[in-house]
Image: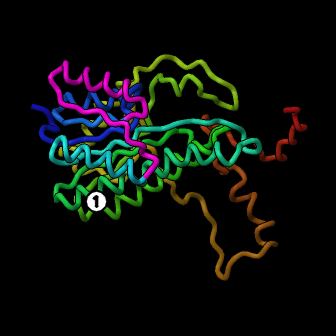
Amino acid sequence: MGVLDGRGAVVTGGGRGIGRGHCLALAREGAGVVVNDIDGAEAQKVVDEIAAAGGKAVASTDDIGTREGARALIQSCVDAFGNVRALVNNAGNVKDRSFLKMSDDEFMDVVRVHVHGTFMCSQEAAFRMRDLGTGGSIVNTVSAAHFGNFGQTNYAGSKGAIASMTYTWALELARSGIRVNAISPSGTTRMSATAKIGGKVVDLPFVDPALNGPFVAWLCSDDAAWVTGQIFGTGGDRVLIVEQPRYGTGMFKPGGWSVADLQQHMKGVFGAKLEPFGLMKPPYPFYENPVKPEPPKAE
């Protein structure tokens, strides 16, 4: 007996890496899993692996970046397993380029998969969860890149949008018994092999991508019925809460602030409190003067 017996689950980008780990963990806990991936051969490998272990799964190559594909994907879960009780939005892509060099296509190709795909798959799943009266769990995928990461305007911006959508959907879907959370996973994958920090590719230690799966399976279970609107850092040996944006240090003046007032008080109040930013969050470096721009480089 597993904590997800009798439940249909969908995992996008489930053919490799972190998504494959999600599929295996959900199936081990009794869920019937739709393994969605643009690479049908890889999706089928995961289906076969689940079947060999005694689980239930079907493959899907539906395009999550289209409304028709998202609708067909969710319907395939209902057709195969009688319901859809869990959706894990894991599919993603990267097209890194510094901001001033990024093309419209490079920006929109990433937004289409991450933001639009997450939106459409989640909406289609929520329609069915609501109409079936079963409730359910939606698990989105964000990244520490949404703290800010050089060369990833498209990817970091998409992950920030998904974080905000997670909070919003948790509020709106609670009345239908649908919980919405997100993970910021860690794991060594084809995508992480191109990871850059400060614009440079970094050689990261190996982290088994399958180690995110058990947390996702738990998050989809009734034992996690008290958890919604949250983002967790998962994978490796960690479970961390990713803190939500919030107001911090402030100053108040009846009647509002003039420019002269701000000149007088800003540095005294905020001078040592400006937020570090970026993936590695170094101490705020700009107190004296802005960094001088580098001269343009030849393409």
Q: How many numbered marks does the figure carry?
A: 1
Q: Nearer the viewer, residue 196 or 123?
A: 123
Quadrant where the image shows the C terminus: top right
Is residue 44 within the magenta segment?
yes
Q: Position of residue 147 (x, y in %)?
A: 58, 44
Near mark 1 (Cα within 10 A), the count class, few <14, some 14-19 or many ≥20, is: some
Work out whether residue 258 or residue 187 is closer to the camera in this orientation and state it: 187
The residue lying at 78 percent from left, 47 percent from top is: 287
Q: Position of residue 150 (x, y in %)?
A: 68, 37
Q: Where 21 falls versus 164 (above or below)?
A: above
> Residue beneath label 1, please?
127
Image point 33% across, 55% down: which residue? 124
Which percent across, then down, holds residue 139? 35, 45
Specify the amino acid type for callout 1: Phe
- Residue at the image point whose x is 40% and y is 20% from the top: 208
Magenta residues span 37-66
Judged left or right of residue 105, residue 179 is: left
- Helix or strand or loop: what does disc 1 sit on? helix
- Tell me the quadrant of the picture where the N terminus can be found: top left
Membership of 267 in magenta stretch: no
Q: Is residue 212 visible?
A: yes
The figure's colour scheme reads rainbow
Which residue is at 17% across, 55% downward? 134
